[in-house]
Amino acid sequence: MKTRFAATAALTLTAVLALAGCAGNTSGGGDMPGMNHESSSSAPASADANDADIMFASMMKEHHAQAIEMSDMLLSKDGVNERVAALAEEIKAAQGPEIQKMEQWLEEWGADTSNMEGMDHGGGMMSDDDMQALEDATGADASRLFLEQMIEHHQGAVEMAQDEVDNGQNSDAVALAETIIEAQTTEIATMKDLLDTL
């Protein structure tokens, strides 16, 4: 009897572990398998997006778009510091896919962003005069101005991302905000170091 009981218990344990393994694989990558229901692909995207998430995605994609525009301006110039140009390339490579991701989320959430037209899209955004100054700058001056402007731009993005971490509900959007905080804080430090060498 003991042997049969032990075998039955072992089979039951194996089945439970197998089921737990399956649950873990479909949980959307959460820390606790089976607990992160909001990120399940079967849940409607709008079900776990609040106003803070919509505001974050709407504003940050415009913020990123300006950073890419600034990077393109710098990269079109001659005589730009090589390390500053490399940083501009990195910014474009990171932020382009993030824009696409946020646009996809807004579409999935059915977000109405029409009332956000004309907003300044958060702190750190460059004015028309700022953008014209960067357009007109050349060589080493352009490198220096790009870094000064992009430091301010990144600081605004970090603040926006922190607002999303504090108030957002969508786990994917909050995770992106955390990534932005980490990446752009590191880039701010890099840019400050570069400025000291120019």
Image (cartoon, grey):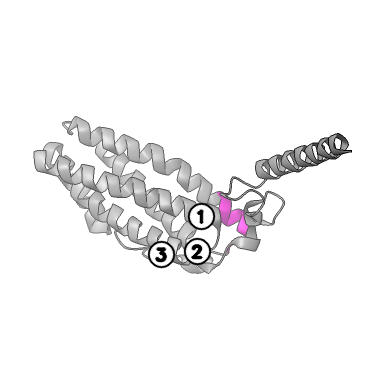
- Quarter of the view holding residue 169: bottom right
Residue closest to the eye, 36 or 97: 36
The magenta stretch spans which residues?
104-111
| SS assignment at label 2 | loop
Labels 2 & 1 near each other (Cβ < 8 A): yes
Residue underneath mark 1 = 173
Can you give x and y, in whole percent of width and height, for residue 136 in the image? 18, 45
Give the SS element for disc 1: helix
Q: Disc 2 marks which amino acid?
A: Gly
| Residue 111 % position (x, y) | 58, 62
Camera sees residue 112: yes
Q: Which mark is residue 109?
A: none
Residue under numbered circle 2: 168
- Which residue does the image show at 44% across and 62% down from the upper left? 164
Q: Main secondary structure of the magenta part?
A: helix
Q: Which residue is mark 3?
A: 163
Question: Which residue is found at the position 54% from the left and 55% from the top?
Answer: 171
**Quarter of the figure that contains the C terminus:** top left
